[in-house]
């Protein structure tokens, strides 16, 4: 299962007078880095979102934005009970004082009471629906994450084909390197013979252990068998990783470093124009593959 760390998903919805829009973006990262930008005051939403993302994603720099919009028409009128009580108490006190002084006052109407400052206040029709809004937003998390993962999988399918093609190129170049190494064998033997003669000529005062070390060093400097065998083994290991049913980006990245190390050593030991050219081609393809692997989850 190969999934890309690059993806995008969006989702929108509404609950009564409140509408919202989700945006979820992801790019590559060494680990899982979550950046959540959510409105305040929605109980439990961040905890639920973070838990879902942590369970569903292994790697990536993931940013989630949520924008809420409350319609102006959602405003309602409500009574301020405390202020209403204060106004009625004051009116009663005025009526009693007027009666005591022999002054007749007209009885205040309901409209008069409501006209007093602070009795009526503006409210929001969604005040009592906070729990409903939070629940609706929480229900959006799974489909949003599913869309995001689906895009990661789609991008991953394209990555998979590119990496497979690059592994095929590396495999072919490794075979070519093995053939070039075999073709250069006569020249290598001649070079080793000349080097051995020089060592023997200078070995008059050299002990047998030192002589053995020098001869072994000459051989190691020209033998690329291990590098070619390791490159072939790495190709097999990478193909196996691409078939895994869980994220393999970290292992592929480590393996790409091993590919590069073997290619560098091959070039250093080549001592042959054809083999050096193949080694340089290997390094170029490995570098291109590593760039693609950087986006694998």
Image (cartoon, grey):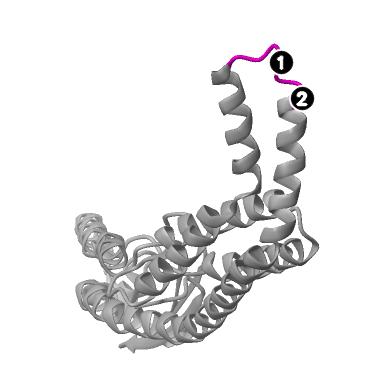
Quarter of the view holding residue 95: bottom left
Q: Position of residue 184 (x, y in %)?
A: 70, 62
Quarter of the view holding residue 103: bottom left
* Near-viewer residue (256 or 42): 256
Residue 155 vertical position relative to residue 267 in the rendered view, above or below: below
Give the residue at x 59% y 78%. Answer: 169
* Near-viewer residue (66 or 76): 66
Q: Position of residue 61 (x, y in %)?
A: 48, 61
| Residue indicated by mark 2 | 201
Is any part of residue 14 visible from this angle? Answer: yes
Q: Position of residue 106 (x, y in %)?
A: 28, 75
Describe residue 81's horizontal placement relative to residue 35 as left or right.
left
Tally of marks: 2
Describe residue 33's horizontal placement relative to residue 281 as left or right.
left
Indicate yes or no whether the magenta region holds residue 141: no
- Tell me the crowding category of disc 2: few under 14, some 14 to 19, or many 20 or more residues within 10 angstroms, Cα based: few
What range is drawn magenta here? 201-207
Residue 52 vertical position relative to residue 21 in the rendered view, above or below: above
* Near-viewer residue (66 or 116): 66
* Near-viewer residue (266 or 292): 266
Residue 231 vertical position relative to residue 239 in the rendered view, above or below: above
Give the residue at x 35% y 87%. Answer: 14
Q: Secondary structure at mark 2?
A: helix
Quarter of the view holding residue 205: top right
- Tell me the crowding category of disc 1: few under 14, some 14 to 19, or many 20 or more residues within 10 angstroms, Cα based: few
Q: Badges 1 and 2: C-beta atoms under 8 Å apart?
A: yes
| Residue indicated by mark 1 | 204
């Amino acid at each position: 299962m190969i999934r890309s760390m690059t993806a995008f998903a969006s989702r929108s919805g509404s609950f009564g007078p409140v509408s919202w829009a989700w945006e979820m973006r992801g790019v590559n990262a060494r680990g899982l880095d979550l950046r959540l930008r959510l409105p305040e005051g929605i109980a439990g939403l961040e905890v639920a979102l973070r838990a879902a993302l942590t369970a569903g994603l292994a790697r990536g720099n993931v940013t989630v934005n949520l924008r809420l919009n409350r319609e102006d028409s959602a405003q309602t009128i409500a009574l301020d009970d405390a202020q209403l009580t204060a106004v009625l108490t004051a009116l009663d006190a005025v009526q009693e004082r007027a009666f005591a002084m022999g002054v007749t006052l007209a009885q205040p109407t309901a409209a008069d009471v409501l006209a007093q400052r602070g009795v009526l206040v503006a409210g929001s029709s969604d005040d009592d629906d906070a729990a409903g809004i939070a629940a609706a937003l929480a229900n959006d998390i799974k489909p949003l994450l599913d869309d995001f993962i689906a895009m990661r999988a789609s991008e991953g399918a394209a990555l998979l084909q590119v990496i497979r093609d690059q592994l095929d190129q590396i495999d072919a170049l490794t075979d070519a390197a093995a053939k070039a190494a075999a073709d250069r064998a006569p020249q290598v033997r001649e070079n080793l013979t000349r080097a051995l003669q020089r060592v023997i000529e200078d070995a008059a005062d050299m002990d047998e252990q030192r002589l053995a070390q020098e001869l072994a060093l000459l051989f190691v400097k020209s033998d690329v068998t291990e590098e070619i065998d390791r490159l072939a083994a790495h190709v097999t290991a990478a193909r196996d990783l691409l078939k895994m049913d869980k994220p393999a980006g970290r292992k592929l990245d480590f393996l790409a470093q091993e590919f590069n190390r073997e290619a560098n050593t091959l070039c250093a030991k080549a001592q042959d124009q054809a083999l050096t050219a193949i080694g340089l081609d290997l390094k170029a393809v490995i570098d291109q593959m590593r760039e693609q692997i950087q986006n694998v989850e």
